[in-house]
Amino acid sequence: MIAAAFPGFLVAAGVLATIPVALHFLARRPPARAALPTARFLTEDPRTLLRFQRKPMDAALLAVRLAFALALGAAFAGLSWMPERSGAVRVVLVDAGADPAVAWADVADAVRTVDGVTPGGGSEDGAGADTEAALVVAYGLDEGPRVVDPADLDRIERGARPATAEEGLRALRKAAAEGGFAEAEVTWVGRPSWHAWSPGLGLMRSQLWPGRMELRPILVDAAVSVSAEAAADAATTSVAWLLHETEGNALQRAIEALGGRVVRTAGTADWIFAADADAASLLPLMDHVRGGSTLVVSGRMSGDVADLPWVVDERTSGTAQLVLPGDRAVGTPVERLPGAPAAGARTVALFDDATPAAAARSLADGCVVYLAADLTAPGLATAADYPSLIRALARGCGAPGSSEGPLDLPLDLPLDRGALRVLEGLDLPGTVDVASIVAAEDIPLTRWLVLLALALLGLEVAMTQERRA
């Protein structure tokens, strides 16, 4: 299916294409014969008179000019191609991340109770010709989310870390973009606990999937409490090292407000903060990260660092406001840097338009965090929640030695009623038009149409020069 962002240019292309058509049906009359050469000055020269003829002159050149006019107009019209979609499907979203409180066999049994799920992809609910069998999408796997056959559920190896609901929603969106169905209903299977709740999920929920999800929660008898070792680690004073930062600045004051202290070497630091750093200065710090430190990088980057949880792309930058868990805005709007979290990275903070602002990734025993803004910007450093932002970044992968995440909550506690309502999306439609979701992910044709128009222009010039010769 092809769509046009500016269809008026297609009309203009059609009008432009009529000009060479009219010109190719016009022909000049040949000169009249005269007895004497001087007699031609006494009669009207018919060479400038035009007449219509039944067949166009030089049909091949006419076809090239028509194609050039249409290609040029189509390039300005912003044409894009999207695969044709049809049918409806029920997507079963399965949390396959690490969860010691739930046996995987219970998860597999819960998936098989969903209507339309049968081994081998068959349907048992009497679906019509336009309704496909349920599509099972497992997320939280070490190799990334994928579509699985219900018959293979028992043989799936769960991920090594807990998965978040944000990962599930992104996996659902990816499956919808790659699938050929037009409409989808979603059933979520997993244990709704705080380990699945990532910062800003309330803002991202309807953006990632603007439809309702039927929850099939797997309940346990009792929540697993935070271990004594994790509590002891949380009570330990954190040591921070600030790369290229002056003593007594706002960042140091925020760390001290959190009960930490700042040192002058990275050898004993639990947290390492680097702003506007280059690859040459960050690479030596990766050894400290592998040893258990947390590296927080912010600001503009120069050079490529493979272990950063951020991928710089051409996404629109500008100004936006940082948002912490609980939808708390931090300071005033700051300059945002382009890019998005890398594959497998955890979102730590958001901008107020629900796009990721910071991401974290585990590296051996440590953690690497990147903030797509200047951490020491005055709009942030003077905010009351600035220490909370520092803590969220410094604990982007969880507290050392525990499974604690950036929310600083007992992650195995079940979600409360409000969080469940947000996750379920009761105010959203039950059936989602997939084409409306992936409309921004279609394939633009402008580049290829411009190249085609240039090629046709070159061919037209070559043909006219050959004709003149």
Image (cartoon, rainbow, N blue to C red):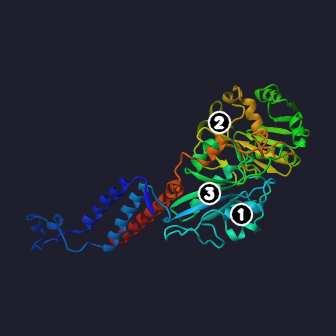
* Sequence-wise first label, 2 or 3: 3
The residue mark sitting in front, 1 or 3, is 1
Check residue 187 in the rendering and tell me which mark sits there, or answer none.
Answer: 3
Q: Mark 1 and mark 2: span between their CA atoms?
A: 36 Å
Q: Position of residue 76 (x, y in %)?
A: 42, 54
Residue name at image x 60 percent, y 36 percent:
320
Q: Amino acid at mark 3?
A: Thr
User: As drawn, which residue projects farthest toward the front?
Assistant: 221
- Could you tell me if residue 356 is visible in this image? no
List the residue tagged with mark 1.
Answer: 109
* Left or right, 229 with reference to 457: right
Q: Mark 2 and mark 3: span between their CA atoms?
A: 26 Å
Q: Amino acid at mark 2?
A: Asp
Residue name at image x 65 percent, y 73 percent:
120
**Secondary structure at numbered mark 1:** helix
Nearest the viewer among 241 and 277 is: 241
* Left or right, 365 with reference to 384: right
Q: Mark 1 and mark 3: span between their CA atoms?
A: 14 Å
